[in-house]
Amino acid sequence: MDEHDMLLSPAGVEALRTALTRAGFTSNGIAGRLGSQATGGVARNDFRAALRATEDRDPLATLIRVFICDQTEPDAAVAAALAPLTVEEALAGGLVERHGDGLRAGVDLEPYGDDWWVLADVPASARPGRPLHAEHVLGIGGATQTLIGATVRRPVETALDLGTGSGVQALHLDTHARRVTATDVSERALRFAATTAALNGQDWELLRGDMVAPVAGRRFDLVVSNPPFVVGPGTTTHVYRDSGRVGDAIGAELAAAPSLLTEGGTMQYLANWVHVTGEEWDERVAGWFAGTGLDAWVIQREVADPMAYVNLWLTDVGEAADPQRMAAWLDWFDAHKVEAIGFGIVSLRRSGHDEPIVRVEDLRQRVEPPMGERIAAWFDRQDWLRVRDTDALLAERYRAAEGLQLRQEATMGDEGWAVDRQVLGMPRGLRWQEEIDPLVLALVGGADGRLPLRDQLALLASAHDVAPEELAEAAGPIVAHLVERGIIEPVEG
């Protein structure tokens, strides 16, 4: 981006960085100044303790009051806090704005991580009744953090952030990619992203256009996207949430973009999908990937009913008092037999194999972070499995996952307790719960890494009076599933 595409001039960005650094306006600096009680209050939008802790109006206190607590402060205090950036430069760039007899935040300037800052628009919740700009630029929200946590953080040459908004995803990509490209349909968003990049000393290629259009014909090792995934009739009022596509077409559109990836490349994005009456949602979403040649793992993390969904997104932009908009949206859901809307993470990989692996599943339990490591490990396990037939699987030695737990449900009868159900539970990682039969329990229980599986099965066959060859044949897909889940792990060497 050229220098006029930022909120401030390059010199202004440098002056702002100097002011923020000098004042200690960082996540750690703010927490140290406010203390745990006030910091916790700020997280709940309760600023009372924070305001008491910043009454002396030194530069850090003023910055906290203006950009964290959304207070209006005297010109002189703001000028001292932002120096060497002048108030005139800050006003011209929209960093602050006049309000009453002083100045208040014109943008959301959020300390992030150890020593980053992210610039975005002030959220709707901070200014009730003030309509959002059609090209409103989001800061760090729940969806943003979900994608940050789910992204595979392995070193790559090239990375792409589709629909960058304020540039949060690109900030993270820059830590493990040699070159970062970011796109957005909104010129306004690109100005914020360019300023975020410069303020944090990063250099990205920024391109304007709708989704993949600006990078047509190019390939990347890693692609991430927090797109405008909101499901509805295709009406566009705010570009950060509305793609202009009908229904959940934006998710299907991104799934059909395998040309973006280099060999071995990964693409990860957030999506909503509709649950249609009479259809299996997972089969419907799996259809997005037919013919792409990509491995796909789709994880559904949340499900909402249409009323809750519409309320959420109308409130998000301050439209809660628009009954006509709500009615039209709900009527569209009714007309298309939408009974629920799912939200989750799509992870794709160009593996180069003729038979891609597609898994679409519900995973709403709490997951041990970072999820990106769990996703990377899942693809690693697929690589391990796809080059081994049943005979090769039986030749390996396996060990049960560390800390694996067994839960049993039993009913008391005339002859004592009768076990009705047995569930293996993983206390770590993705925390899968797997209902199993006695034979699988015996297989997992015997997986101590000492015997090849074929020898282990021979012992089980003898104990259960089953033909060894029959048990071995049946064990192949079971073992593959247990490995895919991470319930048992191959022992190397």
Image (cartoon, grey):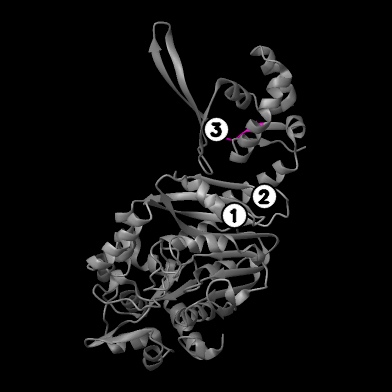
Q: Position of residue 329 (x, y in %)?
A: 32, 62
Q: Secondary structure at mark 2?
A: loop
Q: Amino acid at mark 3?
A: Leu
The residues tagged by marks 3 and 2 sit, at their Cα atoms, a distance apart of: 30 Å
How far separated are the C-alphas under marks 1 and 3? 33 Å
Farthest residue to the front: give it: 335
Count neighbours of disc 3 (C-alpha within 10 A) and say few if under 14, some if 14 to 19, many if 20 or more: some
| Residue nearest the observer in this picture, 213 or 433 | 213
Q: Which residue is mark 1?
A: 289
| Image coordinates for residue 40, horizontal then vertical, percent | 33, 59
Residue lying at the far bottom in this picture: please name it: 88
**Which of labels 1 and 3 is toward the front?**
1
What residue would you read off at disc 2? 356
| Magenta portion: prevailing SS class | loop
Mark 1 is on which residue type? Phe
Q: Is residue 390 left or right of residue 378?
A: right
The answer to whether mark 2 and mark 1 are in CB contact below 8 A is: yes
Judged left or right of residue 323, residue 476 is right
Q: Secondary structure at mark 1?
A: helix
The residue carrying mark 3 is 404
Residue type highlighted by circle 2 = Pro
**Is residue 10 on the magenta stretch?**
no
Q: Which residues are magenta?
A: 399-403
The picture quadrant where one finds residue 330 is bottom left
Real-space Cα distance between discs 2 and 1? 9 Å
Mark 3: secondary structure: loop
